[in-house]
């Protein structure tokens, strides 16, 4: 019995015992004295009959429950006619205890309640019998009438008290059902009449001829069999109806929990159990329904397994199995029988089908709402969640995260590695932030977060960035990806989920462009998308039509003034307007145009360089490699092919790469760099000082040159910190035997400083601005530097 309901049951038991005690006292004080003639044998026989009655019970289906007919009416009638009430109650007590304890193995509050119920019935029956004057003419018609009234009253008492105990116990609806039940169904009047008549005839006969009791024993047993058969039929009929109602109750349920709860509720009702349990293996959970309200779901290996009286059957749910269990019969059911097991089996097979259906449905629904690769909610779910918050008048922060240059990881390392990376990032995001709001994968390398507190959205975004940018070990590689995050606030930036997301997207692009990492949406971001789209299309067309031009900025040796070579820098005019290289290069990187762009610049630069060399100038040319293609395995072959086509020696080509380009994918980068080095191409680390790599790492790479970033060169004479970086780079260069180039030299004092400190090459407006091929050739000629043809 569930703990919480024990108290009201015990209270009901105590009330009954109080009633019996009071009635007995009243009898003792005001009733007729106990006749001295009552034989002890009679008392024992009646007590034994009461006990045996517990064995011969017949259960009839009544309403949703059952009505127990026991042959206890026979000893009751004998007792009413032959035994003084003050003695009958103890006899009943002895019979009840023996029968319930030994034959029905009841214990605890259930035993107490049933014993009290029997005593109450006996007391009520005695009272009715005596009030109607049955005692004055026990074997005459008046006595018969009083006996009938007494047994009917006892039956009524039992119905009311059992309904009461079920009501306090687990189902307050029981009263309602009792009151609305069909009276004919409720009262098994013919059966009560039959047992009562049988008992009366027995008493009459026994009075005449004691041996006749044996005959009546046969009759009683036969009657029991007839009842049992009849009851069996009624129950079978009832079960068909129950199963039908059960399957109907499962129709239209859509959640597994909902189905489990309904199944367990029905099991409790139909099998007449105090609690019902469904234990599943996949997932391993134990669902238990106590009473009407208490529904627990716990891990399968926790929670005590059913002890005491119970029946269980296996359940098949698709490929997995489980167990359906009903434990402790309700007060109106003597014990679980084979009928109950069969009923449970039928219910289990229907429950299994229903559960596997909803699971399938749930799986479908899950996949409709989730991203298959990472298991995170998808765009549809995310938008719905955002809309729900906005509609409810709440505020929120929408974070849109996009990995920087994820496409390169995919291109260079393959989609499998890309997938591993995405799953790792998804896992980190889920683990750290799913508790705070929806974490979704919108597709590709885009993730989104819904933050409850808009004020904390930027702090959250910074944290997300750090989480994502932690190195990801993949096999023996370690990848680091960077992320840009756009933040948009609701309701400030919109009240429509789609609009909010697209604004977060704009902010994300702006963050990416400005390399800010995190950016909150601003209205001016709107224009930039339109511009980006036009530019992207324009750039694609420009590349198709070879409209990109290349300009050259010289590098000179500050000690001698000799021109060493030139850096090739792309230029693009869109509708006559120059587009800053930083802008269109990053566009090309994101739009998958960086490969054709690089190929174009490389071809142009080599072709132009060949022309300078033919004109007698022993100069080199440097081409910038975007980090995106530094790891490209086909790069070396392509470079070799171009060198060959334009007849430029490999040593005359320098490829400028950035530290970040190497760090994105060190292993593949290393392979490409080694292959280029094999060719004899010179490699240069561009923008030195702005990345995060340690100087020590560079020593292991096959590089020839380091270019100190212009941010350290500008004003190096007056700024001690900048000078420190430049000095360190110069020392490093000497130690590692690298060529050190200073770029962005604009002033004479900068130039002088670098010359005095043995910088190998300088580049900058102080020498010359980038210029077209023809102008550069003229400039070379005007330098009057003695040329030496290789
Ligand atoms: P970068 O490789 O660092 O190129 C040097 C940049 O510094 C060039 O900017 C150049 O015009 C500028 N510069 C040169 N001297 C001075 C100076 O004295 N003062 C100042 N303030 N700046 C100077 P640009 O041409 O605007 O190019 C910007 C960036 O775009 C380049 O930086 C490079 O990263 C990228 N880029 C340009 N062309 C290409 C290309 O063909 N391929 C790739 N992948 N990137 C390119
Ligand atoms: Ca460069
Ligand atoms: Ca640079």
Image (cartoon, rainbow, N blue to C red):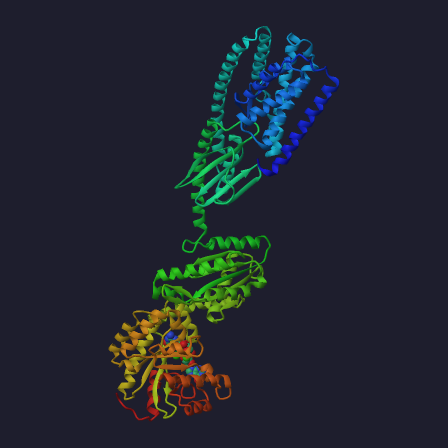
Q: Residue at x 32, y 76 (%)?
A: 602
* Horizontal side, residue 135 vs residue 317: left or right: right
User: Ligand 3 is in which quadrant of the figure?
Assistant: bottom left
* Horizontal side, residue 551 vs residue 290: left or right: left
Q: Nearer the viewer, residue 334 or 680?
A: 334
Q: Nearer the viewer, residue 765 or 363?
A: 363
Q: Quadrant of residue 787?
A: bottom left
Residue 229 in picture, x, y percent from top left: 48, 18
- In this rendering, the count of numbered labels is 0
Q: Quadrant of residue 116?
A: top right
Pick the quarter of the image with the N terminus: top right
User: Image height check: is 732 above or below 667?
Assistant: below
Residue 332 in picture, x, y percent from top left: 56, 27
Q: Nearer the viewer, residue 39 or 698?
A: 39
Q: Nearer the viewer, residue 387 or 152?
A: 152
* Horizontal side, residue 476 vs residue 1: left or right: left
Q: Residue at x 45, y 49 (%)?
A: 366
């Amino acid at each position: 019995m569930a703990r919480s309901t024990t108290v009201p049951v015990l209270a009901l038991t105590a009330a009954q015992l109080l009633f019996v005690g009071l009635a007995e006292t009243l009898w003792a004080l005001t009733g007729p004295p106990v006749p001295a003639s009552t034989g002890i044998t009679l008392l024992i026989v009646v007590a034994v009959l009461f006990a045996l009655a517990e064995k011969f019970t017949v259960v009839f289906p009544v309403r949703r429950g059952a009505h127990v007919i026991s042959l206890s009416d026979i000893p009751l009638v004998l007792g009413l006619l032959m035994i003084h009430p003050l003695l009958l109650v103890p006899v009943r007590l002895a019979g009840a205890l023996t029968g319930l304890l030994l034959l029905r193995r009841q214990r605890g509050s259930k035993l107490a309640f049933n014993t009290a119920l029997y005593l109450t019935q006996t007391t009520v029956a005695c009272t009715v019998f005596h009030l109607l004057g049955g005692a004055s003419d026990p074997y005459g018609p008046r006595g018969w009438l009083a006996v009938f009234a007494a047994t009917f009253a006892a039956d009524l008492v039992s119905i009311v008290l059992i309904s009461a105990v079920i009501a306090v116990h687990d189902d307050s609806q029981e009263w309602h059902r009792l009151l609305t039940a069909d009276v004919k169904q409720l009262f098994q009047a013919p059966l009560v009449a039959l047992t009562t008549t049988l008992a009366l005839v027995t008493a009459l006969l026994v009075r005449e001829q004691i041996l006749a009791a044996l005959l009546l024993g046969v009759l009683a047993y036969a009657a029991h069999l007839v009842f049992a058969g009849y009851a069996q039929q009624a129950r079978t009929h009832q079960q068909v109806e129950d199963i039908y109602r059960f399957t109907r109750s499962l129709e239209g349920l859509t959640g597994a929990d909902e189905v489990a709860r309904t199944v367990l509720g029905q099991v409790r009702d139909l099998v007449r159990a105090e609690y019902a349990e469904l234990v599943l293996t996949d997932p391993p959970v134990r669902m238990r329904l106590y009473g009407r309200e208490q529904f627990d779901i716990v891990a399968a290996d926790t929670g005590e397994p059913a002890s005491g009286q119970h029946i269980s059957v296996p359940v098949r749910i698709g490929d997995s199995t489980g167990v359906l269990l009903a434990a402790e019969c309700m007060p109106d059911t003597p014990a679980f029988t084979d009928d109950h097991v069969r009923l449970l089996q039928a219910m289990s097979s229907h429950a299994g089908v229903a559960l596997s259906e909803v699971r399938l449905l749930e799986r479908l629904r899950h996949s409709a709402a989730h991203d298959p690769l990472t298991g995170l909610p998808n765009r549809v779910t995310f938008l719905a969640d955002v809309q729900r918050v906005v509609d409810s008048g709440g505020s929120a922060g929408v974070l849109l995260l996009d990995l920087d240059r994820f496409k390169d990881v995919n291109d260079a390392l393959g989609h499998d590695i890309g997938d591993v990376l995405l799953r790792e990032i998804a896992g980190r995001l889920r683990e750290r932030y799913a508790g705070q709001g929806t974490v979704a994968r919108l597709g590709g390398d885009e993730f989104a977060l819904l933050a409850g507190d808009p004020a904390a959205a930027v702090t959250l975004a910074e944290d997300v960035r750090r989480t994502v940018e932690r190195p990801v070990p993949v096999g023996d590689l370690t990848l680091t990806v960077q992320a840009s995050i756009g933040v948009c606030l609701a309701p400030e930036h919109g009240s429509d989920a789609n609009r909010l997301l697209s604004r977060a997207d704009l902010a994300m692009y702006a963050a990416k462009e400005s390399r800010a990492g995190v950016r909150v949406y601003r209205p001016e971001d709107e224009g930039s998308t339109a511009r980006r789209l036009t530019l992207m299309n324009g750039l694609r067309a420009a590349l198709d039509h070879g409209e990109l031009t290349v300009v050259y900025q010289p590098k000179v040796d500050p000690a001698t003034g000799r021109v060493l070579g030139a850096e090739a820098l792309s230029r693009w005019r869109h509708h006559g307007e120059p587009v800053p290289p930083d802008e269109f290069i990053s566009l090309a990187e994101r739009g998958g145009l960086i490969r054709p762009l690089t190929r174009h610049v490389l071809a142009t630069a080599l072709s132009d360089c060949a022309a300078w060399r033919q004109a007698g100038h022993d100069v080199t040319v440097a081409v910038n490699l975007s980090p995106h293609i530094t790891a490209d395995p086909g790069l070396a072959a392509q470079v070799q092919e171009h060198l060959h086509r334009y007849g430029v020696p490999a040593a005359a080509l320098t490829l400028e790469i950035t530290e970040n380009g190497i760090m994105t994918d060190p292993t593949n980068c290393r392979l490409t760099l080694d292959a280029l080095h094999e060719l004899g191409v010179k490699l240069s680390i561009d923008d030195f000082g702005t990345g995060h790599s340690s100087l020590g790492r560079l020593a292991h790479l096959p590089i020839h040159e380091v270019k100190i970033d212009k941010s350290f060169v500008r004003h190096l004479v007056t700024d001690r910190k900048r000078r420190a970086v430049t000095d360190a780079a110069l020392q490093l260069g000497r130690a590692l035997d690298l060529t050190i180039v200073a770029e962005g030299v604009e002033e004479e004092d900068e130039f002088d400083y670098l010359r005095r400190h043995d910088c190998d090459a300088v580049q900058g407006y102080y020498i010359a601005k980038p210029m077209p091929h023809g102008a550069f050739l003229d400039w070379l000629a005007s330098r009057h530097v003695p040329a030496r043809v290789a």
